[in-house]
Amino acid sequence: ELFEECKDGLLAKKDFGSVAKATGLPLYWKCPLFEACSSSDFCSYNQFLQVYEHLESQCHDESSKFMRIMTKGARSHLIWQDFNNLIQDVIDSHPGMSFLDDAPEFHARYIETVTGRIMYTVNRSWTSRITTTELRESNFLKILASLEDEPDINQVSDYFSYEHFYVIYCKFWEIDTDHDLIVNIDDITRHADGTVNPRALQRLFQGAVTHKRTDTLTYFDFIRFLLAEEDKSHPTAIEYWFRIMDLDGDGYISLYELEYFYQAQLEKMRLLGVEECSVLDCICQALDLVRPKEQTKISLSDIKKCKQPSLFFNIFLNIQKFLDHELKDPFSTKEGEVPMSDWEKFAAREYEDLIADEELNKQYEYEDDFEEEDEEAPGLGSTSKSAVEAYGI
């Protein structure tokens, strides 16, 4: 009926939301569904029917249908480029993203950020190829479907939150001083005021988590780094930092490797003027925390079974986070509070700080009619509507 109501029986891409809903598919499958049916500006009923009949006869669950639609049946896996048009459609049609209509220069960065978060969370095999099984085992399709019923994009904290994108991109902007979207070892050492273990940062450039030695990291690489750094209890983060600390790649973190990373932490303790904990005491504390199956080396499964993986990694990789944990009030969590992941806490805190800084800057704003224009961070300055303006915060 939808096709019959249109001139010449052809539907445009913008009309495919109704087609998706009529066939029982989530609303935001509409763009890839149209592209799976037609390579032109319009789709005929026969083109749609051919794809629909294949979905019904050959794809027996939501994940297999999504894979077939996204790849047009050409592959059994998804690569990061496959998500570009789907996320662009979210930007173009979700009510919570309308404020970006006047800032197309930030669309590409938002798309890359969302895609980076999808690959980080869903691609558990570290292959840069998402399989149908990985889709089934993730929450991605559930979150994608939820966009239809949630007008505030920031309430969708997994993958799509604009506030989370804002935080990630601004954090990258702070260290990417020449704004060429790549950073070197000196740049990333400045992240978080230099609190991340420099020996761990060196490992980023040695291919421990990027599969190749390199002198620079891309924005895509930084997304993974920041997600892993701020929530070390996430399954991907545990694997990420295990790879960093497993210097010889034998599948274990040895006592030598623990000492290697802790030596750099001792140097930071001396600079901070805090009481040092000896290497032996530190390693004993870590072993008591993890309780490895083999006493002299720690496996990935040992850390995954550990109740406090973040604490274990921070002992060796981030001295400030370790000291913050030692000073933390164990009763600081209030009864009845909605539990938040470490990433969600970090993003909320940083977003508030960014907005406060922006408000402060507005108080000291001068006429800039004659200043040279330059690209600005998303939501900061005149090149786009700020998140403050967009959400009335």
Image (cartoon, rainbow, N blue to C red):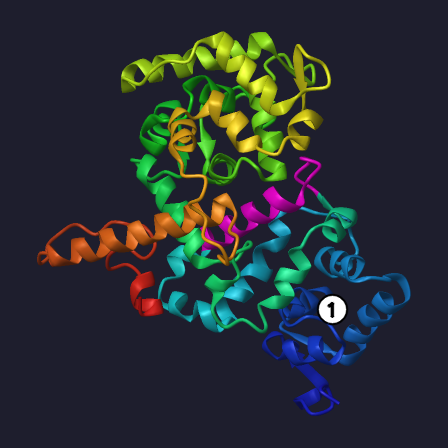
Question: Relative to 57, is 265 on the left or the right?
Answer: left
Image quadrant occupied by the N terminus: bottom right
The x, y position of residue 318, in whole percent, is: 43, 26
Which contiguous range is marked in magenta?
108-129
In the picture, measured across the screen, residue 154 lies left or right of residue 189, that is right
Residue 208 seen in render: no
117 in magenta: yes
Q: Is residue 255 visible?
A: yes
Residue at coordinates 55% horizontally, 47% vertically from top-left? 117
In this view, 330 is above or below 33: above
* Residue at mark 1: 37
- Identity of the amino acid at label 1? Cys
Residue 170 forms part of the magenta stretch: no
Q: Quick one: quadrant of the C terminus?
A: bottom left
Q: Residue 256 sits in which quadrant?
A: top right
Asked if residue 19 is positioned above or below residue 362 in the image, the reply reads: below
- Image coordinates of residue 227 in percent, x first then y, are 50, 40
Residue drawn at point x = 74 percent, y = 47 percent: 134
Dominant SS of magenta comes to helix
Q: Is residue 306 above or below residue 354?
A: above
Residue that lies at the very extreme toward the bottom in this rendered image: 5
